[in-house]
Amino acid sequence: MKTQSELILKHLEAGHSITPIEALNSFGCFRLGARIYDIKQQGHNIETTTVKSGGKSFASYSLVKHKIIIAI
């Protein structure tokens, strides 16, 4: 069975972002910030965006993909 970190990383690699409520509903993860920390420690570049909704603020995380620039 895959760990929560592995499942979340796969979700991010598929091009999706994730919020704490999505992590709880999809992966049973109560501590998304800790799992994101673990993923960052593995060398992945994770972008954090603060989302404001209904007077509340929460984080949304996404994987930053490397852009290849070719100079001619």
Image: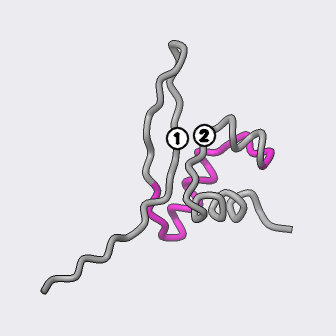
Q: Are marks 2 and 1 in contact (CB under 8 Å)?
A: yes
Residue to which mark 2 is pinned: 19
| Residue shown at 31% from the left, 77% from the top | 68
Using residue 38 as the reference point, say whether residue 29 is left or right of it.
right
Residue sitting nearer the eye, 17 or 3: 17
Residue sitting nearer the eye, 51 or 29: 51
Mark 2–mark 1 Cα distance, whole angstroms, equals: 5 Å
| Residue shown at 58% from the left, 53% from the top | 16
Task: Name the residue furthest bottom.
Answer: 72
What is the quadrant of residue 32 in the picture? top right
Q: Looking at the picture, which amino acid does disc 1 mark? A: Ser
| Residue shown at 66% from the left, 64% from the top | 10
Residue sitting nearer the eye, 37 or 11: 11
Residue to which mark 1 is pinned: 60
Q: Is residue 14 magenta?
A: no
What is the quadrant of residue 65 in the picture? bottom left
Task: Name the residue furthest left.
Answer: 72
Is 36 drawn above or below residue 57 in the view shown? Answer: below
Q: Tell me the quarter of the image containing the N terminus.
A: bottom right
10 Å crowding of disc 2: few (<14), some (14-19), many (20+): some
Q: Secondary structure at mark 1?
A: strand
Q: Tell me the quarter of the image containing the C terminus.
A: bottom left
Q: Which residues lie in the magenta part?
A: 27-46
Mark nearer the N terminus (2 vs 1): 2
Spot occupied by residue 70 in the image (x, y as percentages of width and height): 22, 82
